[in-house]
Image (cartoon, rainbow, N blue to C red):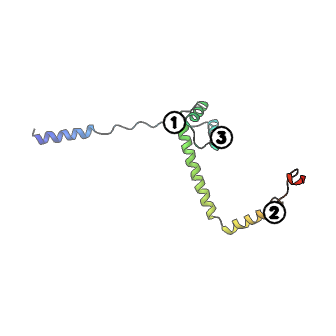
Amino acid sequence: MVRGEVREQANHLNLFNNRQQPKKKRKSRTAFTNQQIFELEKRFLYQKYLSPADRDEIAAQLGLSNAQVITWFQNRRAKLKRDMEELKKDVQTVNPLLVAQHHKTFLENVQDLGILKKRPLPNSIDDKS
């Protein structure tokens, strides 16, 4: 063999050997139980981000891994953001005259109830004079 042929053959073998190893198989999707979802949603209502200690506590309580709790909260925050953007878009597309009419009707009802009228509180300092 000539040197060039040997080098070319070696390069060809290197290309074959340098192939990337197959990626790790992904973990299958976690099917959360209704109870787990209920507890996670309940916590999410008042705490959008968890400290490591809170994460450990929830994971242990619900029989989940830390990674599952982290991922659930990330996905839930993303869903909240999408929902808020959609709601904002919906509000912007509503007929402004309709919104104004409902607002006016609401204010009239509130005024009829006397909620906005200032009334002195019973047993206040002003009553004693």
Q: Which amino acid type corresponds to the residue marked 2 in the rendered image?
A: Gln
The disc, 2 or 1, on the residue closer to the chain's N-terminal end is 1
- Residue depicted at 63% across the width and 41% down the height: 41
Residue tagged by mark 3? 42
Is the residue marked by circle 2 packed among few (<14), some (14-19), or many (20+) residues within 10 Å?
few
Residue in front for this viewpoint, 67 or 34: 67
Pick the residue in front: 22 or 126: 126
The answer to which of marks 2 and 3 sits earlier in the sequence is: 3
- Residue furthest front in the image: 129
The kind of residue tagged 3 is Lys
Q: Determine which quarter of the picture holds residue 14.
A: top left
Measured as percent of width and height from the top left, residue 96 is found at 66, 67
**Badge 1 amino acid:** Ala
Viewport quadrant of the C terminus: bottom right
Q: Which of the numbered marks, if any, corresponds to residue 67?
A: 1
What residue occupies the far bottom of the structure in this picture?
Answer: 97
Few, some or many residues within 10 Å of mark 3 (<14, 14–19, 20+): few
The residue pinned by badge 2 equals 111
Q: Secondary structure at mark 3?
A: helix
In the rendered structure, find residue 47 and report the number of the disc placed on it.
Answer: none
Disc 1 crowd, CA 10 A, few/some/many (<14, 14-19, 20+): few
Q: Who's the residue at 59% across and 35% down the image?
A: 54
Vertical side of 64 occupied by 120: above or below: below
Closer to viewer: mark 2 or mark 3: 2
Tell me what residue is drawn at x 62 percent, y 57 percent.
Answer: 87
Q: Name the quarter where the N terminus is drawn.
A: top left
Q: Position of residue 4 (x, y in %)?
A: 12, 42
Residue 106 percent location from the top left of the image: 76, 62
Q: Is residue 6 left or right of residue 107?
A: left
First in sequence, mark 3 or 1: give its number: 3
How far is disc 2 from disc 3 in space, using C-alphas? Answer: 37 Å
